[in-house]
Amino acid sequence: MAQSTTEITPILTSRDGAVGVITINRPETLNALDIPTVLRLEQALTELEADETVRVIVVTGAGERAFVAGGDIADLDSRQGLAHYLEFAEVIHRCFRRFEECDKPTIAAVNGWALGGGTELLLSLDIRIVADNARFGLPEITLGLFPGAGGTQRILRQMPSCRAREIVFTGEHFTAAEAVAWGLANRAVPKAELMAEALATAQKIAAKSPLILKLLKRTLRHGQDMPLTASLAYEQAMVSLVLDSKDAHEGCRAFLEKRKASFTGR
């Protein structure tokens, strides 16, 4: 009799109250990203973003060793330029941009190696909480490649140019402490405390108005690509729009009445 096998689901989703958790679940490959995994990752994001009861999304990796240790090198070696551009590159760029443009706050809980695509995914998320033994890097140059999932562009916008260039030119790994010091992560915590810290941060944000968070994220995201004069005018318009919401007035009244605000997203 043939022995049955169970297909491993590459992406898992779970809930912790108003927090949705996405787990990249390929520990046997250190959670390496291939096309099926990236497509499932994008699908999970779409479902959690559409769920009105989810207010914050946490992304982490399965297993003890890796958040995402990069792409599938054998798969990359099998590719030629045009096919790669139209297939893998198209999919991963769209997926990471979807995370970047998500109207709900996102949090990375980095539980181990975050190399190549792992660091590039990190750069697409809003808040980054990392295990103190996590390691980061964009080592593609050592393979005769360079980062191709947005890493070359996002890292330049998130840290000093000279440091970013050293990271991509050398391909060397860097530590959790260095990621925090360079502004690529919010804080490093003992690995045993990682998910508790990420979920506590997520719950703190989830207590805020989902509507105001949505408009705030759009203000931050679009404003950073504008000249200062234009971005200040944009902020002025957006915060004025906020005052048409019930949540803004609920927050003000709760403060005046010395009670906890009850935000409904309206």
Image (spheres, helix red, strand yellow):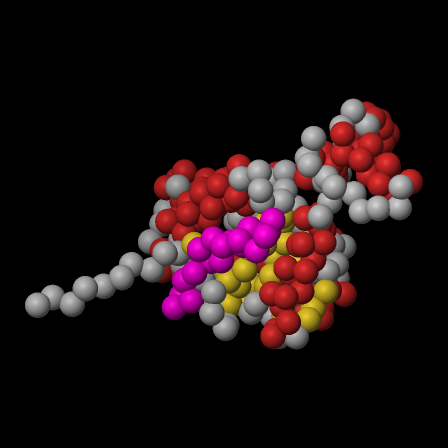
Q: Is residue 185 above or below residue 100?
A: below
The answer to whether 145 appears left or right of 73 in the picture is right
Residue 90 colored in magenta in the image: no
Q: Is residue 266 left or right of residue 54?
A: right
Left or right of 168 on screen, residue 11: left
Q: Position of residue 123 (x, y in %)?
A: 63, 52
The quarter of the rendered structure image containing the N terminus is bottom left
Q: Residue at x 82, y 39 (%)?
A: 251
119 or 165: nearer the eye? 119
Is any part of residue 221 visible from this angle? no
Q: Is residue 149 visible?
A: yes
Q: Position of residue 35 (x, y in %)?
A: 39, 48
In the picture as drawn, the residue positioned furthest to the left comes out as: 1
Range drawn in magenta: 12-29
Point out residue 171 in the picture as x, y percentages from the top left corner: 58, 64
In the image, taking residue 117 as reference, residue 246 lies left or right, namely: right
**Magenta span main SS:** strand
Which residue is nearer to you in this view: 100 or 49?
49
Q: Residue at x 59, y 52 (%)?
A: 17
Residue sitting at x 46%, y 40% = 90
Compared with 224, 10 (above or below) is below
Location of residue 98 by image quarter: top right
What is the x, y in percent for residue 261? Answer: 79, 43
Identified at 51% across, 62% down, the residue is 61
